[in-house]
Amino acid sequence: MEYTPDHTQSVQNILNDLWLKLQSAELIRVGKMEQQLIESHILFVSKAGEGRLMIDFHDYRLRPDAIHFAYPGQTIGVFAESEKEVELYAVRFAVLEDTKTASVFPLAGEVPVYPEPKALLLCDLVTACFRSDQPLEHFRGQSAFLELMYVLLKKIRLLPERDPRTTLDSIKTYIEAHYQQNLTIEQLARMADISPKYFVDLFKKTYGKSCIDYLTEVRINNAKRLMLQSDIRLRDLAHQVGYSDEFYFSRKFKKVVGVSPSIYIKNRRRKIVAYTPSILGHLLALQITPYAAPLHPKWTHYYHRRYRADIPLHLSAYRFNRDWESNVEMLAHAKPDIIVCDKDSLHTREREELEQIAQILYIPGAGMHWRDQLKLTAQLLGAEHEADCWLRSYDQKTKSARERLHRELKDDKVLAMSIYKKSFYVSPARGMMDVLRRDLMLNVIPGPRPDEHRQAISVEQLADLDPDHILVNVCQEPESLGEWHHLQSSAVWRDLKAVRKNRVHLISSDPWREYSAYACDRMVDDLLMRLHGDRPNDFRI
């Protein structure tokens, strides 16, 4: 959004009719904060470090000349761009009209501002007041918060014609329109009227990837589009997207996409739908990239980040399948050839409407092991060879990982737990237990048997289990994150052997709560990283 004098005046007029109430404030220091759901308005002010802020599907660079606003129902995530942690203030607030009813706040996403040292000082004051136990300090915090908003809104910056970001945006657009040409860094830097070295650094800092990587991404994405539209020869295809050597193009394509152009074309001849994330995990293990799948930066973060450009139709990935009607409507317009889904998770009317759209391949969920699900999916789609190859590779990986972990951990007891709302659960997910106990053969503290109802336990019961290592999955929503913060201040928790020895590891729902071949493969990689020195960043929004 480009801010103009008229727009700034309109914002100020709307704010005259609103009450802003401070709810919380904190300074976040984090290397990575996975996408989480928020239930209030949040103002973000960058203090130090280079990184990116994700708000729903939008990716913003954290910098001193911009602030960011997110509103209830959105998801947020933070990612540092170097080994140094990002530092930013998160100020949560409520918005009310004069009538005390909730209203629409006029600012969202990125807002350019002139840097103002006073703003950081006010952020410090607001945060300190919120942490205080004195009611009068909370009153002072509300006053400082309103002063902070006043200072920031007075500093809204009208973007000049030669703003570096505006110039880079125009060059990015130029790359998208002229990717077929032999573009060079020197040529693009001249267009920006800066030195090649500064252009390279500025592009990477602004967009989180190098200019060459972005050019490659644009060329590969356009190659995929051409593959779907015609039976074009590989040599002609390479030339049309800017590569003079078809063999170099093939190597580049396989490195970026993971499969050769010929395999990609074969897989995309049929418009296959992965109706749930677990089905997507099976298809990717079979080297099949579906035409449609559930993608979202929070609910399916990894798949969204890596495959959003490869999968043309993005279905809703909202938890508990609440958006099934919109998914069915999108598929009815897309006219796919095959829909692969888990029958156990479908509503009756949902299943009936899907069966009117395309051929349905049902993969049993409960009661069937993920290996058997993968083999059945492969059999139905004619990919038995790919399934056999993938399983052999997975077994070799887990054998090597098992030997390495057993040398490191010996008979150490491992506890996998989850936090949801105000409850703690042991061994919460099926795939998690398959990987830890069956594939890696670790000494895992058992949870309930499959025929038992999952019961919450207390922190005192956790202490009785006496684990040497703890893997913690915290649901990324405010109440669960608040309970995790509260748990860490508990004397019983701090006295646990695993906590005292710094052997507590935060694990994310993606992949640890997904039951699929691809998710299990990623769990093995994640576990090896975490049990060999990686330490979680504790945070709370």
Image (cartoon, rainbow, N blue to C red):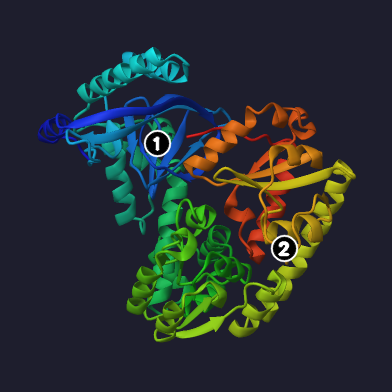
Mark sitting on residue 12: none
Quarter-of-image position of residue 504: top right
Question: x, y (%) of residue 379?
Answer: 65, 83
Q: Is residue 330 left or right of residue 103?
A: right
Can residue 172 be seen at all in this image of the molecule?
Answer: yes
Tally the marks: 2
Q: Are marks 2 and 1 in contact (CB under 8 Å)?
A: no
Question: Dot 2 lies on which element?
Answer: loop
Q: Is residue 313 above or below residue 361?
A: above
> How busy is the neighbourhood of tag 1: few (under 14 within 10 Å), some, or many (20 plus)?
many
Q: Is residue 426 left or right of residue 85?
A: right
Which residue in the rendered view is the most extreme toward the left?
6
Q: Which residue is mark 2?
A: 452
Quadrant holding the N terminus: top left
How far apart are the two marked residues, 2 and 1, measured between alpha carbons? 47 Å
Mark 1: secondary structure: strand
Q: Is residue 194 left or right of residue 366?
A: left
The x and y percentages for residue 540 are: 52, 33
Q: Pick whichever, 357 or 393, lies toward us.
A: 357
Q: Nearer the viewer, residue 456 or 311?
A: 456
Callout 2 amino acid: Glu
Q: Residue at x 45, y 47 (%)?
A: 212
Q: Nearer the viewer, residue 1 or 141?
A: 141
Rendered position, 56 above or below 268: above
Q: Nearer the viewer, residue 73 or 332?
A: 73
Please state the horizontal and vertical placement of residue 365, each as a whole percent of the image.
62, 73
Q: Which residue is mark 1?
A: 61
Residue 411, how many percent across, how many down?
89, 45
Disc 2 or 1, which lies upstream in sequence?
1
Crowdedness near tag 2: few (<14), some (14–19) or many (≥20) residues, C-alpha within 10 Å: few
